[in-house]
Image: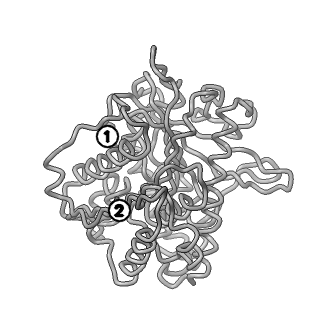
Amino acid sequence: MGLPKPLGPYHVSMADFQLPANSQGICDTPLLRFYYPTTEKESRKNTSANRWMPHFAYTWGYASKVIAPTSSFHRFLVWILAGILYAYSWVCARIKASVASQLLTIQGQNDQFPVVVFSHGLWACRTTYSALCCDLASHGYVVVALEHLDGSANMASYVGKDGKRKWMEHKFSHIKYTIVPMQERIKQLNQRVAEVRRVVDVLESLNLGLLAQSANTITDITRLDVTMFKGRLDLSHVAVSGHSFGGVTAVVAAGADARFCCCLALDAWLEPMTEENYEQHAGNVPILLLNTEAFDWKALRECRLKLLRKRETMSINGRSLVTELITIKGTRHQDQSDVNIIFPTIMKNFGLVGSMDLKLAKDINSRRCLAFLYKYLLPPGSGKPYVVDEVLEDYEHLLISSKHC
């Protein structure tokens, strides 16, 4: 039970990594969930470790989206709902991946893997997009999903200056997300972009073998073996991706950091972008704007059009920038996350599930991401496992609105 089997030919493993607080006592490196190809199959012995809900605290975070914890009574109700959700997810929500297995070694081939850094949306965390991350990893990518420390996650885990693990609740759980001042969202966006760039710094250190196992503050079975990534990451081919708030984070990060080669923005919530973001960080790399049909309103359309027009005026070596805008028909915002697959009945009752079959929506979403990565991230001539066979029926569900090449 749980998430579907990954689409690709490889088995997938997952593990966690986080650095301790810096010399000023500040934790500036988010908790990271690595998804990567391996030879080891999912095992029942790791049943507790490959649960989609990594800790009860995250269930409390999801529940506080439904019931705002604005009083003692409401917090009590949140605890009750969280207990129900946690019991359900413990039985029904498992990720189809082994835990902390060794990275795949391919004899006679380049043993470095391209990387995708993934930024989550509001009220999400490092495991919320495990189906997509596993689909990418099963095709030979190392995917690194970070858990932002800007207060946008449903719950975030970090290590304090005293060396003890602490929890950060959603910053604005006491009010409706629609009335949070945009200036606060802009501050969060700036921190998110800095954290995404910090992840690449960490990956560079891992690739050079500069981090000892003792640097990883994770102590349970999900602890990442840092030594296996030495020399195994192809950091000349790094993509940045994200969903919703993570989508705009990916767009801005792609323009701010030359280490990113392309960007996959899923239902990008572009409204927090400032004029400076448009002028300086409209991006100079290929961007996929992959949208669900229902995630659409006037202000968002205006921001999207502004981004497209800005990119149309830019070029590299005389060539226009690549921007693909694709909409998946019959889908809603959370169809791009795991939530609708994990809690289908609840989400349907809230009207948050599209008309498309949930697994098909997930598969089409993943295949469009994989096709874009193959075309714009990897060097020409890359073969299996990166080649994704076209499913012609997918195009019946797609609105390819624009493509600038």
Q: Residue furthest front?
A: 318
Which element is circle 2 on?
A: helix
Q: Quadrant of the N terminus?
A: top left
The mark found on residue 185 in the picture is: none
Snapshot quadrant of residue 288: bottom left
Q: Residue at x 57, y 84 (%)?
A: 181
Q: Is residue 55 visible?
A: yes
Query: Would residue 346 be found to the left or right of residue 179 on screen?
Result: left
Q: Earlier in the sequence, mark 1 or mark 2?
A: 1
Chosen colour scheme: one colour
Mark 2 lies on residue: 334
Q: What is the spatial separation of the Cα atoms under label 1 and label 2, in whole angstroms?
A: 20 Å
Residue 297 rendering spot, x and y as whole percentages: 33, 80
Query: Would residue 216 be found to the left or right of residue 382 on screen?
Result: right
As drawn, 353 above or below 91: below
Query: Would residue 148 be found to the left or right of residue 99 on screen?
Result: right
Q: Residue at x 32, y 48 (%)?
A: 366
Residue 227 rendering spot, x and y as whole percentages: 65, 26
Mark 2 surroundings within 10 Å by alpha-carbon count, few (fewer than 14), some (14 through 19), many (20 or more)? many
As drawn, 204 above or below 173: above
Residue 13 rendering spot, x and y as whole percentages: 47, 32
The mark found on residue 1 in the picture is: 1
Q: Nearer the viewer, residue 312 or 29?
A: 312
Residue 404 rendering spot, x and y as whole percentages: 33, 62
Q: Nearer the viewer, residue 194 or 358?
A: 194
Which element is circle 1 on?
A: loop
Amino acid type shown at disc 2: Gln
